[in-house]
Image (tube, rainbow, N blue to C red):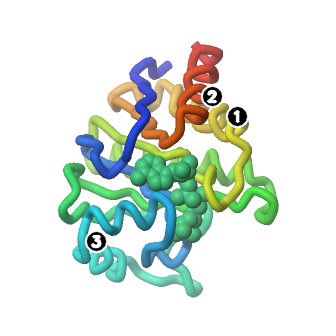
């Protein structure tokens, strides 16, 4: 079991980890929320890296998958762009959210990252209920497969921090 999980209240663009995860959309050309914040902080270079990601069937990153780019001006080395499910629209959102976390961690391992920061994927405009999202994210992150990686959740609001901390305790 991975016990190296921490919860931080703050802005993920400030995270000094090997990789930070972006809650992006399938086009991967920026957006609102954490996606917008990451692109603003990283500078225009990040958009250029994103444009280089191949487009397949009209998208760069299907829901539940992940893509990696360099991080421009951010303290992190890599940005892992993943796309979470839209809660009331995409079928089986729990599987897609789990895949988004799992595929992000798989890419991090492949790029020798020993630390990674996640936002609360899908918990903004995509409308995922917080407690369920926390349970799913922690179930994936707890897996012994990621024992070599320090995983941090950077959460914006005290409410999210409280929910993730509660679920983290329950998963011990
Ligand atoms: N650091 C940490 N968390 C943040 C930050 C930040 N700087 N900014 C926002 N959050 P959202 P989604 C929180 O909507 O639901 C975009 O337009 C935010 O409070 O960013 O997966 C994309 O392009 C919330 O708790 O992501 C997609 O189209 C969490 O990050 C779509 O939104 C996620 O909220 C993705 O929607």
Q: Secondary structure at mark 3?
A: helix
Q: Quadrant of residue 114?
A: top left
Does mark 3 have its CB less than 8 Å from ligand 1? no
Q: CA distance from mark 1 to mark 3?
A: 31 Å
Dot 2 crowding, Cα within 10 Å, few <14, some 14–19, many 20+? some
Dot 1 crowding, Cα within 10 Å, few <14, some 14–19, many 20+? some
> Are the residues at dot 1 and dot 3 in contact (C-beta closer than 8 Å)?
no
Give the label on residue 46, or none: 3
The earlier-in-sequence mark between 2 and 1 is 1
Q: Secondary structure at mark 1?
A: helix
Q: Which residue is mark 1?
A: 131
The earlier-in-sequence mark between 3 and 2 is 3
- Position in image of residue 39 (x %, y %): 34, 68
Q: Is residue 21 above or below residue 89?
A: above
Dot 3 crowding, Cα within 10 Å, few <14, some 14–19, many 20+? many
Instruction: Identify which residue is drawn at 65% across, 37% down.
Output: 136
Q: CA distance from mark 3 to mark 2?
A: 31 Å
Q: Which residue is mark 2?
A: 163
Left or right of 71, for residue 86: right
> Are the residues at dot 2 and dot 1 in contact (C-beta closer than 8 Å)?
yes
Instruction: Identify which residue is drawn at 60% across, 33% down.
Output: 159
Look at the image and tell me whether residue 77 can be seen. Answer: yes
């Amino acid at each position: 079991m991975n016990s190296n999980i921490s919860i931080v209240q703050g802005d993920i663009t400030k995270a000094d980890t090997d990789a930070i995860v972006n809650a992006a959309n399938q086009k991967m050309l920026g957006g609102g929320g954490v996606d917008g914040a990451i692109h603003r902080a990283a500078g225009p270079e990040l958009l250029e890296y994103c444009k280089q990601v191949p487009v397949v069937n009209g998208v760069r990153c299907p829901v539940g998958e992940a893509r990696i780019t360099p991080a421009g001006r951010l303290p992190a080395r890599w940005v892992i762009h993943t796309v979470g499910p839209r809660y009331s629209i995409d079928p089986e959102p729990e599987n897609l959210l789990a895949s988004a976390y799992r595929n992000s961690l798989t890419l991090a391992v492949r790029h020798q990252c020993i630390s990674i920061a996640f936002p609360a994927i899908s918990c903004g405009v995509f409308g995922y209920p917080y407690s369920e999202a926390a349970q799913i994210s922690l179930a994936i992150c707890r897996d012994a497969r990621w024992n070599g990686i320090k995983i941090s959740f950077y959460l914006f609001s005290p409410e999210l921090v409280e929910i993730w901390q509660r679920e983290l305790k329950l998963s011990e």
